[in-house]
Image (cartoon, coloured by chain):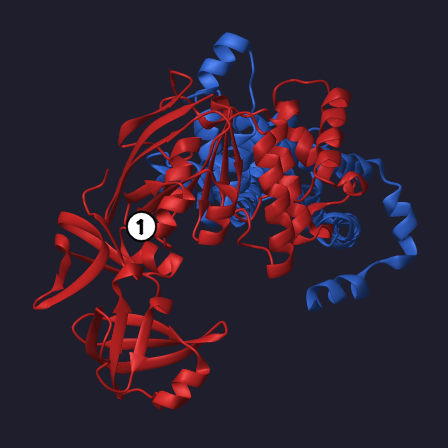
Amino acid sequence: MLPLVGLLVRAPWSTLPKRLADPDIRAALRLSLETATLATLVSLVLGVPLAWVLARTELPGRRFVRALVTVPLVLPPVVGGVALLLVFGRNGLLGRWLDAHFGITLPFTTAGVVVAEAFVAMPFLVISVEGALRGADARYEEAAATLGANRWTAFRRVTLPLVAPGIAAGAVLCWARALGEFGATITFAGNFPGRTQTMPLAVYLALEQDLDAAIVLSLVLLVVSVVILAALRDRWINP
Amino acid sequence: MSLDSHLVVRRKDFTLDIALVADPGEVVALLGPNGAGKTTALRALAGLIGLDDGHVTLDDVRLDRVPTEKRRIGVVFQDYLLFPHLSALDNVAFGPRCRRVPRRLAREQASELLRRVGLADHVRKKPRQLSGGQAQRVALARALAAEPRLLLLDEPLAALDARTRLETRAQLRGHLCSFPGATVLVTHDPLDALMLADRLVVVEEGRVVQTGDAATITAQPRTDYVARLVGLNLYRGRADGTAVAVADDFTLVTATPQRGEVFVAFPPSAVALFPARPEGSPRNTWPATVTMVSRHGDALRVELAGPIPVAADITPAAAVQLDLAPGREVWAALKATEATAYPAAPE
């Protein structure tokens, strides 16, 4: 809590309104919220099925996949960014192919920001959802099967509603992590205002020129994340 | 809708190997002690576990490679497994919905079924708002709503308290009677089996030890487990006319002449106890030692050691007269007319 207090004490309250009106700050904030939300959606689409596979199937190599999923948690985000560059860069493993066939380049684009954030934040979702799935009684799926539900129907109509709180919690964690993402983003997507400059990047940049501006940015980030997290928590996690 | 199955499931320290058949409209009870493999058999029938050998055939169609959701086999699970997030109505409508019945029609069917099981006033309730007996009926309605060709019930009454049980058993009996397909019921409670089933299949350690209707099984048990369930003393021996050698140097005289390997059964109430060797009538008599005395309904159940272990039921008055206590030496007597012998080889 102490660093937060420090932030509040040192805030340039007198010039705050003027600074907040700065279009650069607004652009960075909007970009941050958009990319974090998109990264969470991407993580949901990819992460929930992955968590189901990890929790419910006897797929060979499951342990290995699970270890792989948690790698971004322990990897320094900058290293993650370098790894992403090696894969999706213009000369990267997949990047070259994407560029040649679809004309898609990810590095140093807004899409790149989303990829970097999803890469770092998805493990939070996967781990949370896998835990919820393990906690949910798999026999409900068996009961659904005896009533004629195939695996997909059983998952959609029985398992998903049962683990919804776990998915919501995972999504909130994932979103929060994506919002604060810095290392992988700056490495993979760069720091272009309006395109890839999210709030944490703007804070870092401002820190070198104008300490007050950095503090204002940090405050905004803090307030926004606290408000949204509190709202989501009340609504989903403690029904 | 007849069932013909041979279920073989091998586990590390357990093998299930039973043949199970049921005619349309017939209720077959799988009766056995805990760990006998009853639930395993049910899960194998439903396709929730694979067979290692054998087959499941329903109406001449092999089902053992068909996935659970395509078998059309309804299951009422022991703890019902009602979907907690759905109302009673939507739980019952789940089966029809899976078969692409339009939502409104599915709900109408579900509400009709719930009305039939006496739950018309509870359609909107969530499972956690239902009592045990109500949840059991919702589970039954849910299984029936999917229009199964075979109905499986796993300990359908085990989770209920004694009073609800009595009521629910009678209702369940009625619903099973009106179900056109075959029903297989798993239970460890002989009363459930006797009241609900047309035929009993007794399973012990993964094998069928006895099959038959209630009358046969209660009169002629073939294993100690069944004998205990129906409350009979049971011995195996060699018969030569009415004399059956049931232990070394010990012979019981029975009412039914037989030859070869036989079982001898008689109820504990047929055994009388005396302080000294009784004189007179041609009876089986032997000296025995009291090992335990316990209450058994209105009578006292006396466990005796001797040439054969025997349970005897006597009146409290007789017990006082005999001064019964563990260690007491008495004479046991059994009228030949009370003991029946029947061939040990299964028919």
Host chain of mark 1 = B
Q: Residue at x 39, y 57 (%)?
A: B230
Q: Residues within 10 Å of mark 1 (few under 14, many from 20)?
A: many
Instruction: Give the image location of residue B259, x and y in percent.
Output: 13, 47
Q: Residue furthest front?
A: B280
Amino acid on which disc 1 is placed: Gln
Horizontal side of residue B78 vs A68, given as left or right: right
In-front residue for pair B41/A208: B41
Q: Quadrant of the N terminus of chain A?
A: bottom right
Relative vertical location of residue B159 with respect to residue B215 in this rendering, above or below:
below
Horizontal side of residue B199 vs A123, given as left or right: left
Q: Secondary structure at mark 1?
A: loop
Relative vertical location of residue B290 with respect to residue B157 in this rendering, above or below:
below
Instruction: Give the image location of residue A47, x and y in percent.
Output: 54, 35
Q: Residue at x 63, y 28 (%)?
A: B145
Q: Colour of chain B?
A: red
Q: Colour of chain A?
A: blue
Q: Residue furthest left?
A: B249
Q: Residue at x 44, y 34 (%)?
A: A83
Horizontal side of residue A144 vs B336, given as left or right: right
Q: Residue furthest top?
A: A101
Instruction: Give the image location of residue B12, x and y in percent.
Output: 23, 47
The residue that label 1 is drawn on is: B220
Horizontal side of residue B199 vs B54, given as left or right: right
